[in-house]
Image (spheres, helix red, strand yellow):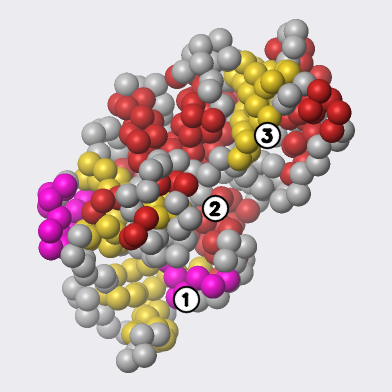
Amino acid sequence: MILQFVQCQDGAYVMRNATTRRRGSLMQAATISAFGDADVLEFGEVPMPSPRAGHVLIKVAAAGTNYYDTLVRSGAVSQSIPLPHVIGSDIVGHIEKLGDGVKNVALGERVIVAPGFPTDPAEWRHTPENEAPSYFPTGTYGWGGYAQYIEVPALWVIRDETDLAAEELATIPLVLVTAVHAVKTLGRVRRGSRVLVQAGASGSGSMAIQVVKALGGDVITTVSTDQKARLALSLGADEVIRYREADVAQKVRDWAGTGGIDVVIDPVGGSTMPTNLECLKPRGTVVNFGLSGGAVATIPHLYPFFRNEKRIVGAWMGSMAELRVGLDLVKQGKIRSALHKTLPLSRAREAHRMLGRGEVVGKLALLPWAA
């Protein structure tokens, strides 16, 4: 069965079983019409957007998947997102059409869509843009990349100069901008810094390892399996801890030596916080930007926390300037894709089930034009 979303006069969309397709007006997409588990993802036909003034229409070559996508799909981010909805923050494709007034890109150019930007046009000049109140990952409130085409403001696309395959590049933008912001801007990692990266085989963790190494730091990381350990080591980790088999805090202290770790990069949250603080040296910094380990974290004892002037800093994505810094590292060969597998967009449900079961070592990419 082919599902088709048809727009009614009141602006709402209804789903129909379509037996024919009006070419040129419809596209295929993975959509959600309700919040829930992976089964709410439906693959079918939806209206193809046309670029408004100042916008571009992009033919999507590949869309990366992120844990954040599962949060949007489940309704954990917001249940006020208009439905039906297309998720997806990581998008690589070619310029198909230009809206009036667009001059920063040309037809046919391959571009990267910013993995996040302010949804309120009045905040588009806010600096840095990730501090704007309406800044969210792409595909949160507006339609995202799980589709054959996407319309986005031209301001939030970057001409691609990496020469990577589309499926490799699509695994990079969101985790890259987040890692540059967390590691470089907030963690202030530099040559000789000793850094613990939690969940080193996750999308965010695998990128954080590479950014730390590109800045000259040393990395110890946590993983759950031998396969994930091999990935972390291949990306530059100096030491790997299988957290189910070891006392992580003790292992980190033994590795770091006197004083403890300089910086902890934590995309997990929740249960990791006591260990993070136990490993940290006086005046060290924990940078957190995740909650897969739980939305509530505990400081075991406040006295050693404030006595040693330790810091916990939250990180929220990053700016276009930081994304460009990261893409320069990609062009220099200092950062690579951690592509685990590609799947046709029609198998988006399977991709989300893999993410939910923790089976992904690195990142997945969805191909909208693959059979």
User: Which of 76 and 3 lies nearest the eye of the viewer?
Assistant: 76
The numbered disc on residue 83 is 1
Out of 298 and 229, give the one closest to the viewer: 298
Q: Earlier in the sequence, mark 1 or mark 2?
A: 2
| Foreground residue among 283 and 88 | 283
Disc 3: which residue = 312
Q: Is residue 159 above or below residue 349?
A: above
The three-letter amino acid code for the residue at tag 3 is Ile
Q: Quadrant of residue 172?
A: top left
Which region shows up in magenta? 79-107
Upstream in sequence: badge 3 or badge 1: 1
Residue 49 shown in magenta: no
Q: Which residue is mark 2?
A: 68
Please tell me whether mark 3 or mark 1 is closer to you in this view: 3
**Which mark is first along the chain, 3 or 2?**
2
Label 1 sits on a secondary structure element that is loop
